[in-house]
Amino acid sequence: MIGGDVYYRKSGSNFKLRSTSGIFEDNEYPAIATDINGFSVAIKGLNAYWVFNNKKFSYPAAYSQSSNQRRSAGSFIAGFSYSQHNIKFDHNQLPAPIVAKLSDALKFKEISYSDYSLSFGYTYNWVFAKNFLANISLAPAIAYKKSKTDSGDRILPTLKEMNLDLITRAGVVYNDSKYFVGASMVMHTYDYRTENFYLNNSFGTIRIYAGFNFNKKKFYRSKL
């Protein structure tokens, strides 16, 4: 009925600049996949959710293999998420032609913001063959963001924004109650938007796994 995630992610600094727009007259920077070392992202937070149809639908059957589901079923889900984001950027690491034309709004050193969101969506477990199950889950969220931007000599005022976020899950698993093998993906997408600045920050986890269970598990079946 109730589940959640606790997560922490931190990127490296070896990014690549693949395209630009709105900076040059021809709308493109001539170099492709330019190495950028002045950018890093760190995210930490938690996500809790409530499954409405928990008597017929099992999230663990798709993502933790602590139960089996023998018939297809779906459920509406609602959730709450809290996360902290820290984005560091050294614009001087960009190619000189871009730095010369870069907007002042993009010459920040660090953005830190907290994200509070309420989500509502739908998830479905499809039993497409004996012992096989696939899941897809989409949960759009209304998010409140409280942030502070450090731009070196200039400190912009605290910004409070309402944006849309998205939590996506997908997985497929074979589970015969004793042995299991499968793959799953969890993707979080966050929007940060002000009057003159927009940032889309996404991260995901892909798992490929195999194992076996020691104990008999509970079965989830739709009632006729």
Image (cartoon, rainbow, N blue to C red):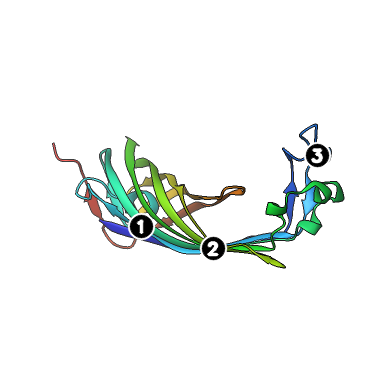
Say left or right for 31 vs 108.
right
- Circle nearer the N terminus (2, 3): 3
Q: Which residue is tagged 2?
A: 158
- Circle nearer the N terminus (2, 1): 1
- Circle nearer the N terminus (3, 1): 3
Residue 113, percent from left and from top: 53, 62
Q: Which mark is residue 29?
A: 3
Q: CA distance from mark 2 to mark 1?
A: 23 Å
> Of helix, strand and loop, which one carries label 2?
loop
Q: Amino acid at mark 3?
A: Tyr
Name the foreground residue: 211 vs 10. 10
Q: Nearer the viewer, mark 2 or mark 3?
A: 2
Residue 99, percent from left and from top: 81, 51
Q: Which residue is tagged 1?
A: 80
Packing grade of label 2 (10 A; few <14, some 14-19, many >=20) is few
Q: Give the quadrant of residue 121.
A: top left
What is the count of numbered marks?
3
